[in-house]
Image: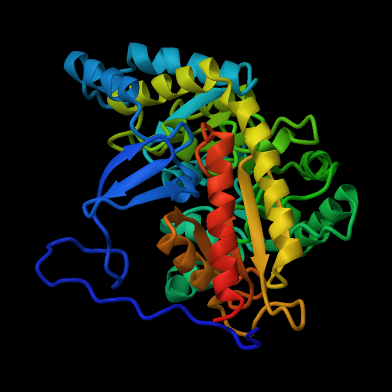
Amino acid sequence: MTQTAPTPADQPIQSTTSSVFYRSSKAYPVAVRGEGVYLYDSDGKRYLDGSSGALVANIGHGRAEVGEAMAAQARTLAFVHGSQFTSPVLEEYTARLAAFLDLPNYRFWAVSGGSEATESAIKLARQYHAERGDTARFKIVTRIPSYHGASLGALAASGMGARRSLYLPLMREDAWPKMPKPDPALSGEADAERLRAVLEAAGPESVAAVMVEPVVGASDAALSPGAGYHTRLHAICKEYGVLLIADEVMSGMGRCGVPLAVRLTDPVTPDIVVLGKGLAAGYAPLAGLMASAEIYDTVMGGSGAFKHGFTYAGHPVSVAAGLSVLDIVEREGLVAKAQERGAHLLAGLRELKAKYAQVLEVRGQGLLLGMVLGNPATGEAYPTPGLAERVAAAARARGLITYPGSGALDSVRGDHLLLGPPLSISAAEVEEMLAALDGALGESSTG
């Protein structure tokens, strides 16, 4: 068994004939069709989408009824600007979404993607305090590691050093105080109490909000705090006059086996909930936030408008996709299925952990699951990343798509694999995933 940090195989360079600005220099297969949990490329190869893209495709691929709902909406009303009109589909969807999330009297602010939703939450927290005359509050406390999006404000809020370092000159670092990530060695209440020291150091009178992922996604695969964490966090925020923002872009909409992951163990209602990914499940760009009645009334009772906006916010065709997706989630009981299939997948991952020493930990909630990988000789992370990419490449060769990552420990060390297939996955397809992971881990343990 190898004792050195493995590195990914060299990737072929793309053809120069394309006009596409790709995300990296690797060669990309051409996806031509999606059906259920599978994607098919132009060479006819089938891939089980074990990460739902980037934890997006919650209802699976190829659902014709979603496309039909979008087409019907496009024929009726394709676009209106949110500063001039509302629309019937937006009004219906907002009411349905609030009921699904059990957020009565909350208001939905619709945008096109998770980064826009995070940016909106940050600005809304700032404006809320300003409307109350508390103009000194502008800082947003987040955690290390965390990932809240790729746009500049969302990235500044993120505690993911590798993605932030190039853009640090564009950020005002003192505006984004960071608290430690959840610590499994502490009780949930004691873990959350560490926020107090961060607020005191930042100057609590300058803090507008605390923003956390109830279950961490890309930055530290499927890490979640203990019971009581969010209740105590919320209480501390109230004590200091700070808003609590739950970033549920990845963990929400049933992904973790409940509509909102912040309520997995605690009966908490955050001031703002950020949503994305599973809202339209990849069929259209749709994200947004849910804001409490107090926040909405304060903003509208002050300047009379949220001083923010995007051209495609509340786009009727995207909202129609979201409404159709919500129909499927509710009709097929996909939130409960996420619990059931997640328990099945997690049990299989635990068996793989017992079989392969490079699997240091498996964890997660519902169908948001993670494998922490490392040196089997020491039981710790390799000094340099590479193992997760190698396992992901071996899985891909076997027709399984996963979501590899690194840097959870110090922005460099710490390999992990994030797993999150569509909530519609069958028991047989879970077994197919596990078989492919078994083969991939076996290859990586000897290569």
Residue 103 as seen in the image, left or right of residue 80: right
Which one is in front, 31 or 66?
Answer: 31
Quarter occupied by the C terminus: bottom right
Residue 4, x across and y down, in percent = 61, 88
Task: Tell me if I can see residue 84 in this picture.
Answer: no
Which one is in front, 81 or 409?
Answer: 409
Residue located 65% across and 45% down the image: 345
* Furthest residue toward bottom: 4
Q: What count of labels does the image hold?
A: 0
Task: Tell me if I can see residue 440 in this picture.
Answer: yes
**Vertical relation: 407 (above or below) 261:** below
Residue 299 as seen in the image, left or right of residue 92: right
Residue located 73% across and 33% down the image: 263
**Vertical relation: 162 (above or below) 205:** below
Quarter occupied by the N terminus: bottom right
Query: To which quarter of the image does residue 202 belong?
Result: bottom right
Residue located 61% across and 24% down the image: 101
**Vertical relation: 7 (above or below) 244:** below
Residue 222, x across and y down, in percent = 65, 52
Residue 131 as seen in the image, left or right of residue 209: left
Which one is in front, 86 or 32?
Answer: 32
Residue 12, x across and y down, in percent = 28, 76
Residue 259, x across and y down, in percent = 63, 28
**Vertical relation: 209 (above or below) 183:** above
Query: To which quarter of the image does residue 398 belong?
Result: bottom left
Q: How is the image coloured?
A: rainbow
Residue located 63% across and 61% down the image: 220
